[in-house]
Image (cartoon, rainbow, N blue to C red):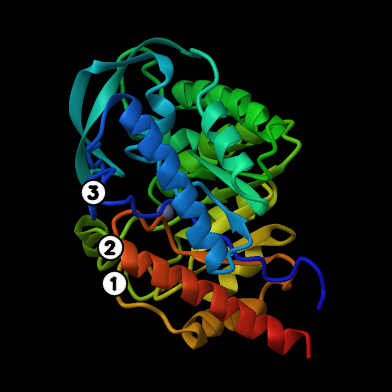
């Protein structure tokens, strides 16, 4: 078998154990506090790592077990953002409303944000470790700005802080840094005007591999309703992929399972790693390995097996835990089916 072929990974999040946070919800409050919360998060990380290893996932994450929400994990540790001033705004072009904190002054990191968590995860798996953080534009879209008064200026500041953090994580042995940019499928003009530049700033000088995750959102009702308005073919990627192909980012994580994205668009990502979503996170129906393999095979018409990473469409945090586990197994088994074919 050729090395580095069809390495599997996940978008990032996994459901949390029922003793740690309320299951099947986003922004779920913690059910523990103090040192019990700290220990509970660590135990959950170990379980998330084991579940991925058992399923044959090659590039694992901490399942985002230590953060309430994929944006908050980073933002909560930034000076200049006031969580006592929550404002309700429409996010992702008003697709849903969220209570978000306010930017009240210049942004800076208080210190390491994910360092301890990354060190812990690194010490508990021998697999390649991926670390996810929200991308600059998605952060900008999930906070209320009362200071910079410019999404671009705020975005570039956020990118600078993300880059500082990412450099530290790479030095701790993180193999892949991934920025999550669902906003890239929403604000196409802003992606062109400053989004790619901010992403490039975030990955500047990184010694590890990098990726950006661009999806159509978690499998929640607001997103499913939105997808139903996007027509027979989803062509948002068609605008961003040529720009990403020219950017510094190493790879792109995209939604392919049960999506209306024409697979041929992958060809626009010439030379980049492609993390192909072969697991649908919007349904509790578990894919068969054969279904996963079919998505991977379709993608192989447009990217080499060395650059193709079978993945999930998005994070699995809102799913029942038993379903997420079964989907991990299907992902591992589906990739193995194709690998066996290719090594014949
Ligand atoms: Zn996603």
Are the residues at dot 1 and dot 2 in contact (C-beta closer than 8 Å)? yes
Q: Nearer the viewer, residue 39 or 186?
A: 39
For the residue labelled by badge 2, is the local secondary structure a helix, a strand or a loop?
loop
Q: Is mark 2 within 8 Å of ligand 1?
A: no
Sequence-first tag of 3 and 2: 3
Q: Which residue is mark 2?
A: 320
The vertical placement of 125 against 278, above or below, is above
For the residue labelled by badge 1, is the local secondary structure a helix, a strand or a loop?
loop
Q: Which mark is residue 284?
A: 1
Q: Residue 159, percent across and down?
A: 55, 28
Task: Locate residue 95 relative to residue 247 in the image: left or right.
Answer: left
For the image, the number of numbered tags is: 3
The vertical placement of 157 against 232, above or below, is above
The vertical placement of 286 against 89, above or below, is below
- Residue sitting at 32 percent across and 38 percent down? 68
Dividing the picture into quarters, in which one does residue 241 lie? bottom right
Task: Locate residue 31 relative to residue 143 in the image: left or right.
Answer: left
Gap between marks 1 and 2, in whole Å?
Answer: 8 Å
Task: Look at the image and tell me in which quarter the C terminus lies.
Answer: bottom right
- Residue sitting at 20 percent across and 32 percent down? 89
Q: Nearer the viewer, residue 12 or 183?
A: 12
Q: Which residue is mark 3?
A: 95
């Amino acid at each position: 078998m050729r090395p580095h072929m069809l390495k599997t990974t996940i978008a990032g999040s996994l459901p949390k154990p029922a003793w740690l946070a309320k299951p099947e919800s986003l922004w779920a409050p913690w059910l523990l506090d103090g040192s019990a919360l700290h220990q509970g998060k660590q135990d959950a990380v170990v379980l998330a790592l084991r579940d991925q290893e058992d399923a044959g996932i090659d590039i694992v994450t901490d399942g985002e077990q230590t953060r309430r929400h994929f944006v908050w994990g980073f933002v909560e540790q930034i000076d200049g953002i006031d969580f006592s001033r929550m404002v309700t705004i429409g996010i992702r072009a008003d697709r849903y409303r969220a209570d978000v904190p306010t930017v009240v002054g210049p942004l800076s990191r208080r210190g390491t944000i994910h360092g301890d968590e990354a060190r812990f995860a690194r010490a508990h798996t021998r697999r390649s470790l991926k670390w996810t953080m929200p991308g600059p534009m998605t952060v900008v879209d999930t906070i209320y700005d009362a200071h910079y008064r410019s999404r671009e200026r705020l975005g570039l500041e956020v990118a600078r802080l993300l880059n500082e953090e990412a450099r530290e994580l790479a030095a701790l042995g993180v193999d892949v840094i991934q920025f999550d940019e669902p906003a890239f499928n929403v604000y196409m003009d802003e992606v062109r005007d400053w989004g790619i530049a901010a992403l490039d700033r975030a990955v500047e000088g990184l010694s590890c591999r990098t990726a950006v995750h661009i999806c159509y959102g978690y499998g929640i009702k607001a997103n499913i309703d939105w997808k139903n308005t996007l027509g027979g073919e989803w062509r948002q990627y068609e605008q961003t992929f040529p720009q990403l192909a020219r950017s510094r980012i190493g790879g792109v994580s995209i939604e392919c399972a049960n999506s209306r994205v024409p697979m041929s668009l992958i060809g626009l990502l010439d030379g980049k790693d492609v993390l192909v979503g072969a697991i649908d996170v919007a349904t509790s129906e578990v894919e068969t390995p054969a279904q996963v393999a079919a998505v991977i095979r379709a993608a192989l018409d447009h990217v080499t097996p060395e650059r193709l990473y079978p993945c999930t469409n998005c994070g699995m945090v809102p799913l029942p835990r038993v379903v997420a586990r079964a989907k991990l197994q299907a992902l591992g088994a589906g990739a193995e089916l194709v690998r066996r074919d290719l090594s014949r």
